[in-house]
Amino acid sequence: MWGYFCLNAILVILIVVVGFYAIVGITLENNARDRVTRAGRDMAAALKTGVSSDLTDEILNYRGEGVNFYIFRTDGKNLQPADFGGVYDELFKEIENRLGDKEVGKDKFFRTGNKINYALVAENKNGEIRYILASYSMSIVRETVGTLQLWLLFAGGIAMLLALLFSYEFSKHLTRGLNVMSEKAVKLAHGDYEVEFINANYKEMAQLSDSLNYVRDEVKKSEDFQREILANTTHDLKTPLTMIKAYASMIMEISGDNPEKRNKHLQVIIDESDRLTGLVNDVLSVSKLRSNMEEMNLTVFDLTELVYAIVEKFGYLQESQGYTFMIDIQPNLYTYADEEKIYQVLYNLIGNAANYTGADKTVYISLKSNFDGTINEFFVRDTGKGISEEELPEIWNRYYRVKENHPRPVKGTGLGLNIVKAILENHSFVFGVDSEVGNGSEFWVYFPAVPPEVYNEINNSENK
Ligand code: ADP
């Protein structure tokens, strides 16, 4: 990580230094050009108006600014600076070459060595043609810039050193935090759910810590769930198995020859086996629904018939245990769903109502179409103790059981409502429960209605 930081710092500093070199170079050159142009044109104007006879004042003024002037006649004699030895002949030729004809106002830029030159053709107040050359030497400026650049290099070096140091410390800090986190993640992977991911130094790291803590909680929950499912199922399996073994022994040793007793004991074995089957089926359903392994087999079917069939299943409670099922079921109501799973849902809800209803042992079941016939509303109500407000959201969870003893005419595993919830959510059906302590509970499911014509049409085409 430190390597990347260093590279980054070096790149930034290099860009700044090179940029500075380029910008300073270009700016200086442009400034010099502006300066000689301005000076040259000023001088041409002074020449034309003839403010002073030999322009010495102007020339001295500009010299102060670093601009030197040369003024020539067209025959090559230089008027400024005064010279009698032909020292400037070369220069004159150069100017004459560059300017070509002697048209007033014509001008040209050119460089000679370190100098920026501006030559132009002008005339004096008598209309005589003169060549003016304004020349600016960049050498002093270059020297200053050179010193500046040296300083810049020096400052750049220091900045680089500081950047390296800073990034070293920063990356050390950052990687230390990351290393601690990854060590903790390994611990978590080995099953230590006590690890706490803490890192509040940087926002992103804090977010990562939060996510990892969340992962830890979820993994722990899932592990707890597995442990719980194992504990609960083994416990629930043990009771019927003990019963089966005990009654089988009794038949062998005591009741084998007494048909009445034997049948009674055999019935217990059958009931307990049913309980076992139910339990195993529930556990399978939960794990399949949980991993979305079970596919939905959607069909249009007769909901009225299905509810009747389930109520009939509970007929033995009416006959042998004094239960009453008050039903209010509208005929010919159809829906589109997975029939087998809806059977499971309604069986669980009605079974729960029977389990938890009050002393009157009454369960109310209704299935009706709503006002505009778009929804078939199923309700099952009991007269039991009801469910408290805090417990209401919990009952849909796996293995949740309200901590009280209930009479249990129907087998229960604590998985029923969880299966109900998973199935109805898979169907995207609306469902819920209304309950109040002391006033019983009412569970309801809204099924989308399929019109009888559609149902008949499908049935007819299937029978053809
Ligand atoms: P169980 O096999 O224990 O009935 P469920 O998942 O079907 O498991 O129900 C979970 C818990 O919700 C039950 O243990 C019970 O405490 C509560 N419950 C479910 N239905 C009713 C009801 N009709 N009246 C009161 N409590 C209920």
Image: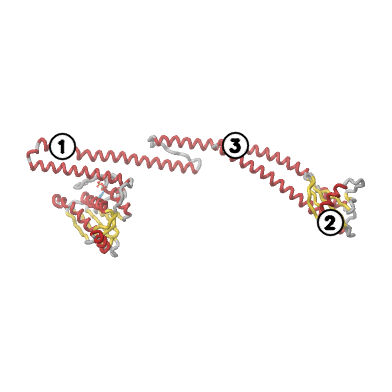
Residue type at the position of mark 3: Leu
Gap in angstroms between the C-alphas marked 3 and 1 = 81 Å
Going from the N terminus, do you reach mark 2 or mark 3 first? 2
**Residue at the disc numbered 3:** 164
Q: Residue at x 13, y 36 (%)?
A: 249
Picture residue at 90% right of the left edge, 51% below the top: 77
Give amino acid for label 1.
Answer: Ala
Q: Report crowding for label 3: few under 14, some 14 to 19, many 20 or more residues within 10 A (C-alpha).
A: many
For residue 202, above or below residue 366: above
Asked if ligand 1 lies within 8 A of label 1, the reply is no
The disc placed on residue 246 is 1
Left or right position of 84 against 145? right
State the quadrant of the N terminus: top right
Report which quarter residue 381 is drawn in: bottom left
Spatial separation of the CA atoms under disc 2 and disc 1: 132 Å
Q: Secondary structure at mark 3?
A: helix
